[in-house]
Image (cartoon, grey):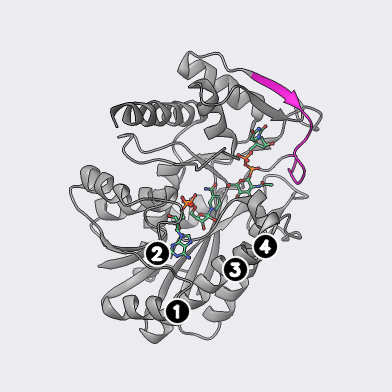
């Protein structure tokens, strides 16, 4: 069966393509390579023994989107990763974010309707919960006002998907990711942050390898055991596997409602200092860091209630924090090696 993966050369998309091909699916990727590169296709082929089909188009272009989806008549389901995702950048460029993330989604859903493709999986984010009143946060928690235009695109996208499902033309699953980190064990694919990373883990590994001088820990006066914020970090391969489960659920008619939402996290929260400690332990490297002011817009603590995903999807994140940090470190080391060989 053929699955269309938008954003399939990106970080989470590429790991998901590997899992889909491993599960026997044929994959077509759409990506405009705005935040990834073609070499990822070679890496996927090295890992799985097979090249996915690839269409380099921009989903904002309605004509191209319709043309490409119409060309692949036998697509059974779509996983939609393609989006811009830098929170800070979205504050400076809101229109670019709304245009990219929402027009792409609308064009995609329109093309699916035209071609009677009925199964849709969407990349959402725990950012839609803001600072939850109750922890762990479950799928039933009320959504808070988005902290950024990026976060708002996820909230609006979920509404667009639900309204489309309500017309009866498709079924959909939104997956709300917590904090994905780490890389494939082969170290052939992983996250490629462009410029200075915003996220904690790539910043840690880049500091340890000497690209950055020191990590700034944004605040130690939060109401948490060591004063630093808590997040639910999840390994990207665990996350990728959940997408295969979600696709199977739709294709095999195992869904309970036409539109379902699942949290994808481990259910365990770690403070920034605990993450650093884990990194130092597995890498054998002392990290240079300093405590600075809080980062505006950061929430204090969030971790997921995983009961619904564990029970309904029969999926559970397997990797713990030390595995995740070692995987992130191995990826950084592999990146260094490949740069040296170029
Ligand atoms: P990524 O930037 O690595 O991958 C996104 C891919 O989409 C890139 O390859 C990019 O070139 C492509 N793309 C963007 N706009 C496009 C367009 N208009 N047309 C065609 N291709 C386009 O990001 P990622 O970390 O893999 O994230 C994937 C999805 O998961 C995104 O929707 C993101 O918002 C969501 N998400 C990510 C995280 C995270 O921490 N990485 C957390 C929660 C949700
Ligand atoms: C951020 C986004 C979220 C998005 C996610 C994945 C915000 C408010 N949220 O989550 O919407 O889905 O990225 O892209 O931006 N930290 C440091 N020093 C650093 C970097 C981070 O101390 O240099 C701390 C942060 O304060 C936070 C934790 O590390 O407590 C994790 O930060 P980060 O990796 O940026 O993810 P989130 O902020 O959780």
- 248 on left or right of 61: left
Q: Position of residue 157 (x, y in %)?
A: 59, 69
* Residue 201 quadrant: top right
Q: Quadrant of the N terminus?
A: bottom left
Instruction: List the residue tagged with mark 3.
Output: 158
Residue matched to label 1: 62
Evaluate whether residue 95 shows in this view. yes
Front: mark 4 or 3 = 4
Dominant SS type (magenta) = loop
Q: Secondary structure at mark 2?
A: helix
Q: Give the magenta-colored segment's residue range.
A: 289-300
Report, in whole angstroms, how far the alpha carbon at label 3 lies from the one at label 2. 19 Å
Q: Nearer the viewer, mark 4 or mark 2?
A: 4
The image shows residue 289 at horizontal and vertical percentages of 65, 20
- What residue did someone put label 2 on? 249
User: SS of the residue at dot 4?
Assistant: helix
Q: Are marks 3 and 2 in contact (CB under 8 Å)?
A: no
């Amino acid at each position: 069966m053929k699955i269309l993966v938008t954003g399939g050369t990106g970080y989470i998309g590429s790991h998901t393509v590997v899992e889909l091909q491993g599960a026997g699916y044929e994959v077509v990727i759409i990506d405009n390579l705005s935040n990834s590169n073609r070499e990822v296709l070679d890496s996927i082929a090295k890992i799985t023994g097979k090249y996915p089909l690839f269409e380099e188009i921009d989903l904002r272009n309605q004509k191209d989107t319709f043309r490409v989806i119409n060309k692949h008549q036998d697509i059974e389901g779509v996983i939609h990763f393609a989006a811009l995702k830098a929170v800070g950048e979205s504050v400076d460029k809101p229109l670019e974010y709304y245009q990219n993330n929402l027009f792409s989604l609308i064009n995609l859903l329109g093309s699916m309707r035209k071609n009677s493709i009925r199964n849709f999986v969407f990349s959402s984010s725990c950012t839609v919960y803001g600072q939850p009143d109750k922890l762990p946060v479950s799928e039933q928690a009320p959504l808070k006002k988005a902290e950024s235009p990026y976060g708002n695109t996820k909230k609006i996208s979920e509404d667009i998907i639900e309204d489309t499902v309500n017309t009866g033309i498709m079924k959909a699953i939104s997956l709300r990711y917590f904090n994905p980190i780490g890389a494939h064990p082969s170290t052939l694919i992983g996250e490629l942050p462009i410029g200075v990373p915003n996220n904690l883990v790539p910043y840690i590994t880049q500091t340890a390898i000497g690209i950055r001088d020191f990590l700034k820990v944004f605040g130690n006066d939060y109401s948490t055991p060591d004063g630093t914020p808590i997040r639910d970090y999840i390994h990207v391969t665990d996350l990728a596997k959940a997408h295969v489960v979600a696709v199977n659920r739709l294709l095999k008619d195992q869904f309970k409602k036409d539109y379902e939402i699942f949290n994808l996290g481990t259910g365990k929260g770690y403070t920034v200092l605990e993450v650093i400690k884990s990194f130092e332990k597995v890498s054998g490297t002392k990290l240079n860091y300093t405590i600075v002011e809080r980062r505006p817009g950061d929430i204090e603590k969030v971790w997921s209630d995983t009961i619904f995903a564990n029970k309904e999807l029969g999926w559970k994140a397997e990797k713990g924090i030390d595995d995740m940090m070692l995987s992130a470190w191995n990826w950084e080391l592999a990146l260094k090696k490949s740069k040296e060989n170029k």
